[in-house]
Image (cartoon, rainbow, N blue to C red):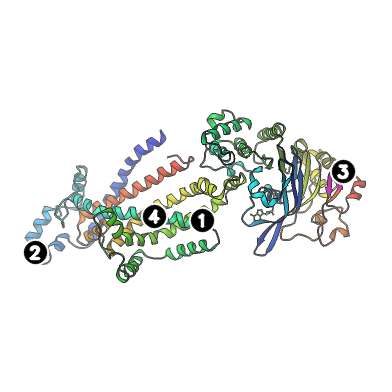
Amino acid sequence: MERFKFILFRPLQLLPVLFGVSVISFVMVRSIPGDPVRLLLGTRATPEVAAKIRAQYGLDEPLMTQYLLFLKNLFQGDFGRSIVYKTSTFNVVAERIGPTVFLLAYVLVMAILITLILSTWAARRQGRLPDVIVRSYSMVGLGLPTFWLGIILIMQFSIALNWFPTSGYGESVAENLYYLFLPAVSITLALSPVLIRNLRASLISEMESDYATAARSRGMSENGIYFSHVLPNSLVPAITLLGINFAWLIGGTVVVEQVFSVPGIGQLMISSIFARDYLVVQLITLVVAIAVIAVNFIVDVLTAVIDPRVHL
Amino acid sequence: MMSKLIIRDLTVEIVTPSGPIFPVEQFSLSVEPGEIVGLVGESGSGKTMAMRAVVGILPRSAHIASGEILLSDADNAFVPSSQQSHLRHNIAMIFQNPTSYLDPLMSVGKQVAEPLRLHQGLTRKEARTEAIELFRKVGIHDAERQFDVYPHHFSGGMKQRVLIAAALACNPKVLIADEPTTALDVTIQKQILELLCRLRDETGISIIFITHDLGVVSQLCDTVSVLYAARIVESASTIELLNAPLHPYSLGLIRSQPESAQRDRPLPSIPGQPPALNAMPSGCRFLPRCEFAIQACKQPSPPPLVQTSAVRSNACLRWRELQTLGLNYD
Ligand SMILES: Nc1ncnc2c1ncn2[C@@H]1O[C@H](COP(=O)(O)OP(=O)(O)O)[C@@H](O)[C@H]1O
Ligand SMILES: [Mg+2]
C-alpha cells in the first residue's frame, strides 16, 4: 500500500522541479549574448524581414510575456516552433532522441556488465594479480576525460585499424551496436572506474561481514555466499551511485555525440545553443530533467525492492 | 549420533607488518559427547579466535599455525583436521551479536532453510517445512508466519534463536556458543540458556560455551577451561575449578565475580592489565599481576599445561604448593 502510494504520488512531486527547470533554462539560454534571428538570416537581411520573423516567433514580446506564453502552450501540449527547423520542437527533438537513448542504454549495459565482472574478479582475489590489474584500471581511468578517450579510440580503431566507423548512426539495432560501439566504450571507460572502485570495496567489506562469516560456519561455499548474501548487500550502494552518476552520464553523452558525430539530442542541444534556437534548448533541458528524475525514482524503487528495511 | 571433539595444541598466527602474533597458543580442549564445556577468560584472551579456528572461519589475516582438531565419526574413529573443511558444518557456531550475524536482506526462514537445502539436499518446500520445525524447536512462536519475516523485525533474543535454528540446520555434533547472551537482557539471557540446556538434553549435542560470567558457568557447564593471554591456564570440572582453583588467575576471576563479593568491601579485581599480543612477558604471562610469583616463574617460555589429575590440568609452576596452601576467597 505504502509502495503503491509512493509510485502514484511521486510523479506529482515532479511538477515543482520541472517548473524550476523550465524557468532556469528559459532565463539562461536567453542570457547568452546573440540574436537568433540575426544568426538565422545572416548580416544581409533587412531590418523589416528580421522584425517580421521576430514577431512571428514572439521574440519581440517582453521576457515575462514570452515565458507565460511558453508555459500556456506547454500545458496545451504545444512545445513551440523551432526557429531553425521551422517545425514543432517536439518533432525536432523526437527525431533525434533515438540515437541518444540507444547510446545511453548501450553504455548502461556495458558499464554494469564490466563493473560486475571486474569488481567480482578483483574482490574474490583480493590482493592478488587480478585485483592489482582492476585497481590500476580504476585508478588510471578515474582521471581520463571522455572526449580525449573518444579521440584516442577513433585514431586507433577507426583510422589506424579501420575496424569501426569514425562517426554516424546505423539503421538497424545490429548496425547501431556497431556504429555506437566506440562512443559507448569511451563513455564506459570514463564511467566504470568510479563504479568499480565502489562495488569492489563493498564486496570486500561484505565478504568479511559477520553474516558472511556465519554462512561460512554453516558450510556454505564461497560462491553460494557471494551470490546469495554478498552481492545483494553490495548492490544497494552500487545502484545508488549509478543513479547519482546518471546526470554526469548525460553530460558525457553530449560530448561523445559531438566527437563521433552521433545525430542525437546532445548534438542537437549544442547546435541549438549556437543557433540560439531557444525553444529546442528548453525542451531538451526539460527532457533531460525528466530523465534524471525518472532514473532516481527507479533507483528508489529498486532499493526498496532489494532492502526490506527501506520504506518508500 | 554423538561425537567427541579433541582440540590438540592449536596455535593461531596472525602475520602483521611488525612480525607474527599468536592470539591462540597451544590450545587443547576435549569435549565429550553431550557435555557442556565452559571457556572463560577476559575479553581479548583469544576465546573467539580459538573457536573460529575450530569452526574454520578465521579472519583473512589469521591462520592455524599448528595443532589438530579431531572429531570422532560414526565408527568412533577420529577424523584429522586436514579434512576439516568438509566437516565444517559438524561444528556449528552462534555468536555474541546476533544482529550482525544475520543477513538483513534475507528472510529469517530462508537463512535457516539455506543449510538444510545445502547439507540435506532438501527441496525449497521441504526445507521450509523443516525450518519451521526448527523454529518451533528453538521456541519461536507462530513459526509458520515468522518464516518470511526479515531480521530487523526481530528482537535480539529472537535473532539469537534464529541463529541457533540455523546452526541446528547443519545437524552439528558440537555447538559453539560464543557469549550468546552478552548482548541480551537478563530475562532473555535465562531463556536462551534454558534453550541450550534443553537442546543438549534432547539431542545429546555437545556445547562449548564461551562466557566471562562464572555464575553462568556454574549453572550450565560440566567442565571449564580458563584462558589467559592466548593460553589455557587451567582446565577442570566446574565444581572443582570453582571451589578449589589451582591457578592464581582462576582464583582472581572467582574473587572478582560480584556474587562472591562481601557486603561492605569493594569488589576485588585483579590488579593490572593483561599483556598485549605483541608484548608478551617471558615466562608465565600472568606473572606481572600474580601475588604468588616467584623467581622460577620468569623462565624463558611460558609454563606448559600439565595434567595434575585424570581430569584436571594446570599451567602454574606452584600448583602443588597452592593446593596445600588451600586457595580461598579471602
Ligand atoms: N582480525 C583480527 N586481526 C588481528 N588481531 C585480532 C583480530 N581479531 C582479534 N584480534 C586480536 O586477537 C586477540 C583475541 O581476540 P578474541 O579472540 O576476539 O578475544 P575474546 O573472544 O577472548 O574476547 C585480541 O588481542 C584481539 O585484539
Ligand atoms: Mg569474543
First of labels 4, 1 by sequence position = 1
Q: Nearer the viewer, mark 2 or mark 3?
A: 3
Task: Tell whether A129 sits left or right of B164.
Answer: left
Assign the C terminus of chain B to one quadrant of the image.
Answer: top right
Task: Tell whether B219 sits left or right of A240.
Answer: right
The residue drawn where x is 12% and y is 65% is: A42
First of labels 4, 2 by sequence position = 2
**Could you say whether the residue bearing mark 2 is in a helix, strand or loop?**
loop
Using a 10 Å C-alpha cutoff, classify the residue at mark 3 as few (fewer than 14 neighbours), some (14 to 19) or many (20 or more): few
First of labels 1, 2 by sequence position = 2
Q: Nearer the viewer, mark 1 or mark 3?
A: 1
Using a 10 Å C-alpha cutoff, classify the residue at mark 4 as few (fewer than 14 neighbours), some (14 to 19) or many (20 or more): some
Assign the N terminus of chain B to one quadrant of the image.
Answer: top right
**Circles 4 and 2: CB atoms closer than 8 Å:** no
Query: Chain ID for label 4?
Result: A
**Could you say whether the residue bearing mark 4 is in a helix, strand or loop?**
loop
The residue to which callout 3 is attached is: B328
Residue lying farthest front? B75
Picture coordinates of residue B144 (x, y %)?
54, 29
How much space separates mark 4 and mark 2, taking CA atoms? 45 Å
Using a 10 Å C-alpha cutoff, classify the residue at mark 1 as few (fewer than 14 neighbours), some (14 to 19) or many (20 or more): some
The magenta segment: B308-313
Instruction: Tell me if residue A38 is in the magenta stretch.
Output: no
Picture coordinates of residue A138 (x, y %)?
45, 62
Q: Main secondary structure of the magenta part?
A: strand
How much space separates mark 4 and mark 3, taking CA atoms? 69 Å
* Badge number at residue A163: none
The residue drawn where x is 19% and y is 63% is: A34
How much space separates mark 1 and mark 3, taking CA atoms? 54 Å
* Badge number at residue A201: 1
In the image shown, does A5 or A137 lie closer to the viewer?
Answer: A137
**Are the numbered discs 4 and 3 placed on the same chain, yes or no?**
no
